[in-house]
Amino acid sequence: MCQSADGIDKMNKTTNGQNSSGKEFLVTFPENKLEANKPEQQCIIITTLLNAASVQVTSLSLSINFTHTVNITSAEGDYICLEEGIQLSGSGITDKVVRIISDNDVNVLAVDFGFKSMDIYLALPVDQFGFSFYVVTYQSTNDKTQFSVTSSSADTSVTIEFPPGLTTLQYNGITILNPDIIYVTLQKHEVIQFQNDRDLTGTYVSSNNPTAVIAGARKSSLDTKSKRDHLVQQMPPVTTWGKHFVSVPSPEKTNTSEDLYRILASTSNTTVHVGGSIYHLEKEGDWLETRISATDPVEITSNEAILVVKFVTATRTFDPCMMIVHPNIQWQYQYSFRFPDTNTYAYAIVVIDSFFKSSLMLNSQPLDIQTWVDVMDTNLTSGYILLPKASYVIQSASALFGVYIHQKDRREAFCSGVGLDLTLINEVRETEIT
């Protein structure tokens, strides 16, 4: 048998279709800081693992007429850019949603551009939207945190519970003092974006119909006064949170560098182990921030399901970016991805059981990684490889593993996972509005 570090029988584990590939997606582009009167195009990367796919990309906004159909294979993928003006702006409800329909399962990355600024996120298919989420943002001086909620159904009732300490909230042209809980109704394919100058981490979003939640910051320098960049990720539903993770190295950072991690609890009395440190989160929605080595991955475990978010900190040569760290139990046997067209090269980062690292294949050839670093006190290891701009499939016939992509560019940095299993592994009661 092939056993993972937490005892899962990898060879017998299947996703049963509950993963981040799918046939229908609703993609939105949260506000990025733009140069005055010069809106940016927003782009979508589409790849497939096995079968060729016919894919249609359509703007659902009445103000933007865009439809594009493309046929793709795993050897090619495609990079589609939409007309200017599809990006969200300010706080309020809009129809600026992009629909992606495919006749076979595809993988989608959204590329959110601004002025000398970008980040990407793994888009989840509509059949993996959820009913309950917590938001993670990062407040930075002189800029906005933000999150959005997208509805896939008519008459979607959304409840938003804000963290304490928020003094004002504006949306749809109104100002709410000391907001606590607000209720919003979205129609099919509508999206609402909230912006604020305070940190919105810990905001709880629930709904009676499936929704998507995307969060981050318009343009953040994190906790430094150094480089600034857009931050964005699609939040996984609480029901898919896990208990066992490995932190993700940042290629090219020095061995004295650290990155920021925020960890949220889904349940009260949550104990979190980060390497040799122990943290206690008293109630659901509580969160902690910690620093972890940017070069030496560590194990993160908890007694209850948690969400782990990494922020790559800015340096003289690194812009910040944001990524969801996926639980080990949500790793897959194969991934497809393509880099944005803005970069000539970028990194693929892999985490796998060290015994099976030789089983990894890149586009049907052995994956030659020379940078492996073992995760202390586990049988896991992590490594990365610099790859030219192209479409890729990474797979193993022997073991589940995790894959992330990262580009440290000083103007257009990005980082993101490229796929995951989304089986409901966190048995919590989803809040539904009646």
Image (tube, rainbow, N blue to C red):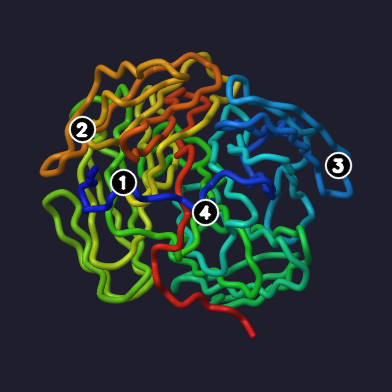
Asked if residue 358 lies left or right of residue 101, the reply is left
Q: State which tag comes first along the sequence, 4 or 2.
A: 4
Q: Which residue is mark 2?
A: 354
Q: State which tag comes first along the sequence, 1 or 3.
A: 1
Q: State which tag comes first along the sequence, 4 or 3.
A: 4
What is the spatial separation of the Cα atoms under label 4 and label 2, in whole angstroms?
A: 26 Å
Q: Which residue is mark 1?
A: 10
Q: Amino acid at mark 3?
A: Ile
Proximity of marks 1 and 4: CB atoms separated by less than 8 Å: no
Helix, strand or loop for disc 1: helix
| Residue positioned 57% across, 31% down in the render | 50
Q: Amino acid at mark 1?
A: Lys
Q: Amino acid at mark 4?
A: Gln
Q: Position of residue 135 (x, y in %)?
A: 49, 60
What is the spatial separation of the Cα atoms under label 4 and label 3, in whole angstroms?
A: 32 Å
Q: Amino acid at mark 2?
A: Ser
Front residue (pair 95, 154)? 154
The circle drawn on residue 18 is 4
| Residue positioned 45% across, 39% down in the render | 417
Helix, strand or loop for disc 2: helix
| Residue positioned 22% across, 61% down in the render | 272
| Residue positioned 71% across, 71% down in the render | 156
Which quadrant, please, contains the N terminus? top left
What is the spatial separation of the Cα atoms under label 2 and label 3, in whole angstroms?
A: 49 Å
Asked if residue 338 lies left or right of residue 383, the reply is right
Proximity of marks 4 and 2: CB atoms separated by less than 8 Å: no
Proximity of marks 1 and 3: CB atoms separated by less than 8 Å: no
Front position among marks 1 and 3: 1
Q: State which tag comes first along the sequence, 1 or 4.
A: 1
What is the spatial separation of the Cα atoms under label 1 and label 4, in whole angstroms?
A: 16 Å
Considering only vertical position in the picture, is 330 above or below 383?
Answer: below
Q: Which residue is mark 3?
A: 64
